[in-house]
Amino acid sequence: MDKAEVWGLLTRKTGAQGNQVSVCLKREFEHDPGRVWAMLTDSACLGNWLAPGTLDLRLGGAVKVDFGLSGTPIDSRVTALRHQRLLEYSWSAGSDPERPVRWELKPVEQGTLLKLTLTLPEDERMAVSCAGWDAHLEMLAAALEGINIHFPADRFRQAREGFSQLAG
């Protein structure tokens, strides 16, 4: 298995906001799309794997997630929505550059394939951002099983190194 299969697929692109990377992380869960969708969108579930917050589940609806002292608060709007299939908003706040977070769910034989695509500035924080989302996906997997875990710092460190190598 190569590095891209372990950590994700990284694609470079140049756009209006300068050099960016698109990073795709995939996970397969043995839960139906409705259950995974609820974890991604239900305010009562967000704190179990991401951070306390609210999500107004309609196009243009407010997305607010507060990571406290450990990260950037999300203060955004839903920019794409297809019930139990697609959710997109920006992982940014205020005048920060847009950093879209796109969640895509696909039913598979054993449950749900979740594809998370991040669009980020290509800078020194890219690997940290990707590693943070990777760690939160680990927390999502546990929360789907009814288990709340603390932020997996060891996984984060491994992922940060992996994404740093991917970025070259």
Image (spheres, helix red, strand yellow):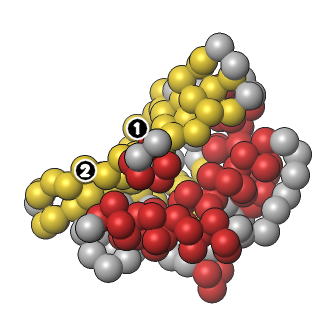
| Residue 26 position (above or below residue 17) | above
Let me know if residue 134 appears in the view.
yes
Q: Quadrant of the C terminus?
A: bottom left
Q: What residue is rendered at 55% in x and 35% in y? A: 114
| Residue 80 position (above or below residue 89) | above
**Residue type at the position of mark 1:** Ala
Q: What residue is rendered at 63% in x and 66% in y? A: 155
**Left-right relation of 90 to 38:** left
Where is mark 2, residue-wise?
11
Q: Marks 1 and 2, Cα distance to the nearest angstrom? A: 21 Å
Q: Nearer the viewer, residue 126 or 65?
A: 126
Q: In which quarter of the image is residue 110?
A: top right
Q: Which mark is residue 162?
A: none
Let me know if residue 117 appears in the view.
no
Q: What residue is rendered at 32% in x and 79% in y? A: 124
Where is mark 1, residue-wise?
80
Where residue 6 appears, as percent x and y from the top left, is 49, 49
**Left-right relation of 100 to 19:** right
- Marks 1 & 2, CB-CB < 8 Å contact: no
| Residue 149 position (above or below residue 41) | below
Sequence-first disc among 1 and 2: 2
Q: What residue is rendered at 37% in x and 70% in y? A: 164
Q: Which residue lies furthest to the bottom in this view?
A: 69
**Left-right relation of 54 to 44:** left
